Amino acid sequence: MMKELDVFLKTVVEGMKTMAEGIEVLAGKLETIAKSRGDVAPKRKAKAKVARKSPAKSSKKKVPQKASKRAVSKKATSPTAVDTVLGIINRSKKGVNTATLMEKTGYNQKKIANLVFKLKKQGKIKSAGKGVYLKA
């Protein structure tokens, strides 16, 4: 029984070896056909990229890069909330109150108050009265 099993396993192994050799021959023929037709070899899977830590910042001065020949197109960004409120205030001659800002922007009263506070601190607007703001 064991001898028969050994003989059977040997024949299976030999058969698999011949099949592998045949597959290699077929693969070689396919490559030559693809090259003769001008096809590009199939792409292999890329290795996974390993995330690297950014290098420590050095105290050396950076040399400015030369401008590239191609102009890089920048995506149009929407204005920030501060820019929106500042634009509304700058367009008005008599000043704008918080109710008008809330109506035009759609922001709530707390957000308007925070934005006005930032703008006043930066010196871009000034108060004309309680709740009325003018450009500085």
Image: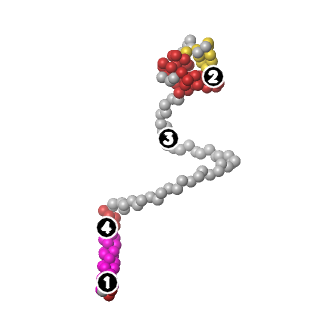
Left or right: 57 as drawn, with respect to 14: right
Name the element at disc 4.
helix
- Comes first in the chain, label 4 or label 2: 4
Q: Pointers 3 and 2 in contact (CB under 8 A)?
A: no
Mark identifier at residue 72: 3
| Element assignment for label 2 | helix
Q: Residues within 10 Å of mark 1 (few under 14, many from 20)?
A: few
The residue that mark 1 highlights is 5
* Element class at badge 1: helix
Q: How far apart are labels 2 and 1 at the CA level?
A: 92 Å
Considering depth in this image, is 4 or 38 the residue closer to the camera?
A: 4
Whether residue 132 is situated above or below residue 23 in the rendered picture: above
What's under tag 2, amino acid-wise?
Lys
108 falls in the magenta region: no
Which amino acid type corresponds to the residue marked 1 in the rendered image?
Answer: Leu
Q: Which residue is mark 2?
A: 120
Q: Nearer the viewer, mark 4 or mark 1?
A: 1
Q: Residue 105: percent from the left, percent from the top?
A: 49, 22
Q: Amino acid at mark 4?
A: Leu
* Residue at position x 31%, y 83% in the image: 5
- Residue at (50% x, 40% y) in the render: 72
Q: What crowding class fits label 3: few (fewer than 14 Cα within 10 Å), some (14-19), or many (20 or more)?
A: few
Q: Residue furthest front?
A: 1
Quadrant for the N terminus in the image: bottom left
- Sequence order check: which comes first, mark 2 or mark 1? 1
| Foreground tag (1 vs 3) | 1
